[in-house]
Amino acid sequence: MAKARYWLSRGLFLRGLGLVYAVAFLSLAAQARGLFGTRGLLPIGAFLTLQRDAAGALAPLRLPSLFWLDASDGMLLAVALCGLAAGVALVLGCASVVATFVAWLCYLSFVTTGQVFTAHPCDLLLLEAGFLALLSSPSLAVAPRFAPPLPVVFLFRWLLFRVLVGAGIGRLHGDPCWGSLTCLPDYLETESSPTSIALLVHALPMPLHRVLGFVALFAELVVPLGYFGPRRVRHVAGAVTIVVSVASLLTTNDGFSSLLVVVLSVWCFDDALVEKLPFVREWLGDSDESPGRRTLLGLQVTAAALVVASLLEMPRTFSPAFGDRPSLEPFHLVNVYGVVEPVERTRSEIVFEGTWDDVAREPAHWLEYGLPCAPGDPMRAPCAPSPYLRRLDSRLREASLGDFRREPWVIRVVDDLLRENPAVLGLFSKDPFAGKPPRFVRAERYVYRFARSGEPGYWHRELVEDYVRPFSLKDPALFEFLFRKGWLRK
């Protein structure tokens, strides 16, 4: 039997990875100024200054980033566009190690310095997959000269295995309703940013929810074992993973995690199967070269080291007490995947409101700001499925689960809305005060649920409490809070 080759598989993977990079950097280019810019919510420049004061000359080693050179708004945009160009180059077939390294380094620069806004699981997954892509493209030529050897193929399958098994174990440890197959309705309603398709799936009867919940757990805990099985078993396992991941992508707007899982699943298929796709061989070409002994030995040693490092981290995956985002610092080469958290039974959201009135108490007339994909207005339809990660929407969803003191930057959002700061307002989809700043701004916590049959709109919501009480720019409490945090605007 002929030895399996992965030249075409690698070509599809690198183009898919380039697409993920392009989406990720496109979202960063659009949001970086408001999130990390000089007038953003958590400026990278100020963060690096604090890190340098605390760690001295070792700070750049602990937080590797291009932004040590310059953290201006222009630099943020330049790094994002540079990463976007590298991603597009990968999509177009310029799959040299140079393109993969540039994309990886630019993304690492954001993740290590973006603080809470780059703490999303998909950020770590992209960094680890991007580093493995360097190993699959060891040639400095425009296109790799030989197919990736089996140790590299194994690393990608091992990463995919860890991601899915970690997710499955995290679910079972996080909430017993997954074991009883009753979680899915609450999960669809409360997790991430549901799509219109999620609303339709939510309306299905409970027996079907149980079936879908079982399929999800089976795909995460059993199917990944097939990645290391015989050829046909690998093909079936890869196909099941792709189908389930596409379903996840269609029901939740939670970044590009599901898209990246689809791209990683390509490594379950060898060239004998991939070449059956129309025009693939003409598109990706071929090569008869083999890696040299030194290159092969280097890849084998690197693969062994990464596997050992990931095995040392595996106990955290199987423990219900592992942290949110442990990884092999400072480059996040080996991460732990899966979140041990109970499924929320109610969906809470933070909604910012402002008023022009002279007093903040009733009967003040409050107008609501809108975020691109957060529920917000109950009459607005959920966003269409997309791998585009809206980082402020996502982080505010996390902040709504606790007190604002856990996420103090929310107060800075209030201050910036009072000032009509264009950098931060660019993160919102609706500003009812354009051109005339409000006198007071507050943040309200609402509880949302999907609208039932016969109810108007897409959501039903009820006010729970003031998440942040009304503030004005003249409020001494606001000044004192921002002063203590070092967040006063010049």
Image (spheres, rainbow, N blue to C red):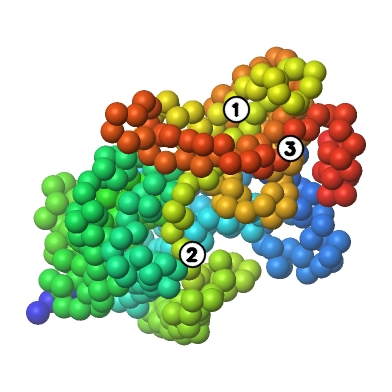
Q: Which one is in front, 70 or 261?
A: 261
- Residue 439 is at least partly visible in this image: yes
Q: Residue at x 12, y 71 (%)?
A: 232
Q: What is the spatial separation of the Cα atoms under label 1 and label 3, in whole angstroms?
A: 16 Å
Q: Amino acid at mark 2?
A: Glu
Q: Which mark is residue 341?
A: 2
Q: Secondary structure at mark 2?
A: loop
Where is 270 relative to 154, above or below? above
Q: What is the spatial separation of the Cα atoms under label 2 and label 1, in whole angstroms?
A: 29 Å
Residue 219 horizontal side relative to residue 330, left or right: left
Residue 207 in the image: x percent, y percent? 19, 56
Q: Quadrant of the C terminus?
A: top right
Badge nearest the viewer, 3 or 2: 3
Q: Amino acid at mark 3?
A: Arg
Residue 74 in the image: x percent, y percent? 69, 37
Q: Circle 3 sits on which residue?
A: 469
Q: Residue at x 36, y 49 (%)?
A: 188
Q: Residue at x 56, y 37 (%)?
A: 463
Which quarter of the figure has residue 43?
A: top right
Where is 281 relative to 154, above or below? above
Which quarter of the figure has residue 290?
A: bottom left
| Of callouts 1 and 3, the N-terminal one | 1
Residue 483 in the image: x percent, y percent? 88, 44
- Residue 140 is at least partly visible in this image: no
Q: Quadrant of the N terminus?
A: bottom left
Q: Amino acid at mark 1?
A: Tyr
Q: Circle 1 sits on which residue?
A: 369
Badge nearest the viewer, 1 or 3: 3
Q: Secondary structure at mark 3?
A: strand
